[in-house]
Amino acid sequence: MSAFDYCFSTLGCSELNLHETSDLAQRHGIASVELRALSGTVDLIPALSAEFGTPAEFAAFLAERYLSVAALNTSIRLFGSTDLSVIEPFIAWAEAADISYLRIFDGGSRLRPDEMTCAAELLDDWQALRQSRGLNVDLMIETHDALADFEQLLAFIDRVPTAKILWDTHHTWAKGSDLKTLWRHVAKNVVHLHVKDSTMSSNGQRRYVLPGHGDFPITDLLSLLQSGERHIPLSLEWERHWHPELPPLEDALKAARNWWR
């Protein structure tokens, strides 16, 4: 059995609603999606409400299509926030559809000790809320900003050893982290992964390219994951919503077949 489940983020097809996204997934033999954008917006709850009305109807649609949702992605940032109350509208939709995780960003840049302490307290409050309400859904924190830095990620996990991490493998790799070294330190915390490919432009900036057309070491990553015992979603994050010059997600999914399989 593979140590990961292939899925894709709807950031790459943000113009589609979930009915159309489901059709896309079915064409490519993919049974799970990560919801970041729908119907042209990253504001997921209004988009889901407009398409399905209620969380129950949303869950029924997923069951009818045999489609699972790996995560609902919020725009909330952990570092710099004073509370996580804005997560509330996502909970009912996640619970109804048996979605395991809500993604939140890390945020921040160079973290001060007080920022780390505040983040730890917010996550403690969240776990208390989960327990009091009997929630199944949990939070996962993406290595997008401050936590894309190897040393800060390790310090954060040392401070919050139960933290669930969405490892954006490209972000940490592009910032100079060795995949194997990082994985050795964070494997127990990682519950979801993002992958994408890029090449270095003449101006020294990384430019996203179709999977397999850049220099991201996908073979090394897959080797690490295959050696694990847990089943972790591996999501193609094709950032076409932010970079409309990129080819359609359909092209990226076709390219990814040889890249990651």
Image: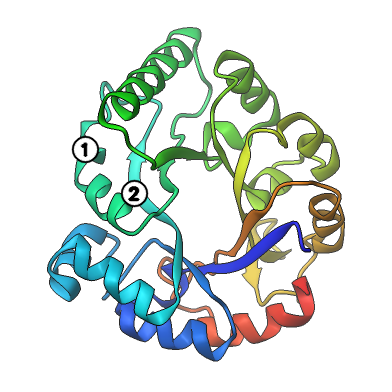
> Which quarter of the figure is the C terminus placed in?
bottom right
User: Disc 2 marks which residue?
Assistant: 74
Residue at the image position 54 percent from the left and 86 percent from the top: 250
Regarding residue 150, the answer to whether it shows in the image is: yes
Q: Position of residue 204 (x, y in %)?
A: 70, 56
Residue 141 pos. (x, y %): 49, 38
Q: Is residue 183 depicted above or below 234 in this figure?
A: above
Name the residue beneath numbered marker 1. Answer: 86
State the image coordinates of residue 125 (x, y, percent, origin top left): 33, 19
Q: Is residue 248 visible?
A: no
Compared across the picture, whether 116 is left or right of 7 comes to left
Separation (CA) of disc 2 from disc 1? 9 Å
Quadrant in the picture for residue 164: top right
Q: Is residue 42 left or right of residue 34?
A: left
Which mark is first along the chain, 1 or 2?
A: 2
Quarter of the image for residue 10 reads bottom left
| Vertical arrangement, residue 254 with respect to residue 4, above or below | below
Q: x and y percent of residue 34 in the render?
A: 46, 63
Mark 1: which secondary structure?
helix
Q: Residues within 10 Å of mark 2 (few under 14, many from 20)?
A: many
Quadrant location of the N terminus? bottom right
Query: What SS does tag 2 mark?
Result: strand
Q: Residue at x 59, y 84 (%)?
A: 29
- Amino acid identity at mark 2: Thr
The residue sitting at 38% across, 14% down in the picture is: 121
Between 167 and 138, the one lying in front of the other is 138
Confirm or deny contact between disc 2 and disc 1 (CB under 8 A): yes
Q: Which residue type carries mark 1?
A: Val
